Amino acid sequence: MKIVALLAVLVGAAPVLSNPVCLQNEARAAPTKTVVTRFSYMVPMGVDALTQYFTQEKAAKYYASVTAFGLVPSQTYAAFPTCTGTDWQRFKCYVESHNKAHPQQLYKVVFLARHGEGKHNVASGCDLINPDKMLDADLTDPKGFNEATAARNYWATAAAAPLNVWKPEKVYVSPLRRSTLAGYITFNGLSSFVQDVTFKDELGEYKGKQYYNRRHNTDWIQNNIIRSNTTFQGLDQLDFCDTEWLRYTLQWTQETNMATRVKNFLDEAFTVDADKNFIYITSHGGTSQAILSVLGRSGSLFGGDTGQIYPVLVQYSSTATATITKLSLPPARTAACSLSAGGCTSTIPASFMATGTTCP
């Protein structure tokens, strides 16, 4: 089936797109402040004499073609002998039983998924700084869409007998177009799968001044991807517009701030999802590597290929509580900003907007 036809089935016929416009002088609520638990994250300490749960934990990279997402086969869990069934059924029972028995040393399964190949992944030179081609970069057709579809097909098979892979209990998605599409294609319409998918700006890429890492506004995401699907939540928690001004004033996407950003996300997610033992994150290569580092592993384990899915078992314990401000508002502007026209940059230093490439 052609990718365009597949999207027509999944998403519906696309409307004619207008230039995404962001009104910076709109009335805005105060930044949301959330009380979260601060956690320390680490590799499981082996309290049950187990030190490895997935075959790829010591490998360079992981692909969805590995059987059952690489869960170590025929693993026995001596501490909980009543856990029976398939490999994944026993593993699910093990994690849940462990958390009941060790409330101060909790486990959570985290899947890190990267979007399929994006147009920016294969572009070069002046194309990379052309807003008409690169703004909020799309998936490539066919490879990028095929990789997202492959993840969907893999889940549809893996969650059924005989593998019976544990289904995610919560899904988080970066609101950039390529990751939103990947998350939508992966989970939309899969029967009995998670019905709780939440957008988080914290999961965006760190190289934010490139056009391909600037997302559309929330109206565009709603009207062109999500439509009437109520599985996807959290658009109202995103700032309406993500322009150059927002990125410049908040410095959110700088690489040096990446660890703090994903640590805040994980602390909030682990607080909100205290009752969920399996969360799934669809985002980007740089974001996934940063998350792995915060979780006590080497970011390089994630590798550099698109379409990857990397599962880890995390041990975590609370260290304190803190109040975090989810988004600080930038200084107000009075003009409307057209993202496609590259507007709203007049008061931003040229050094911030510089791309390092001179084009006609």
Image (cartoon, rainbow, N blue to C red):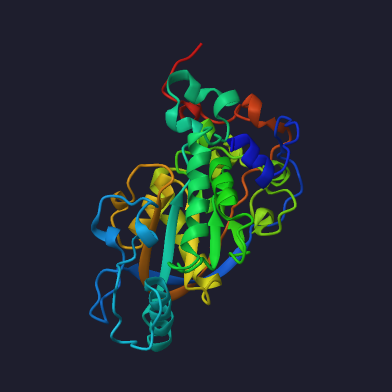
Task: Give 155 or 33, whichever is nearer the viewer.
Answer: 155
Give the residue drawn at x 48%, y 51%.
151
Give the residue drawn at x 41%, y 82%.
99
Name the residue furthest front: 162
Q: Quadrant of residue 69?
A: bottom left
Query: In the displayed structure, would residue 16 be above or below residue 325?
Result: above
In this figure, what is the number of numbered marks? 0
Q: Is residue 349 left or right of residue 7?
A: left
Is residue 103 visible in the rendered image? The answer is no
- Residue 357 in picture, x, y percent from top left: 43, 20
- Residue 11 in picture, x, y percent from top left: 68, 45
Give the residue drawn at x 66%, y 42%.
241
- Residue 29 in picture, x, y percent from top left: 72, 55
Query: In the displayed structure, would residue 119 be above or below residue 70?
Result: above
Q: Quarter holding the N terminus?
A: top right
Q: Quadrant of residue 52?
A: bottom left
Is residue 329 visible in the rendered image? The answer is yes
Q: Is residue 69 left or right of residue 223?
A: left
Query: In the displayed structure, would residue 46 be above or below residue 66?
Result: below
Q: Is residue 138 left or right of residue 356?
A: right
Name the residue furthest top: 360
- Residue 290 in picture, x, y percent from top left: 38, 52
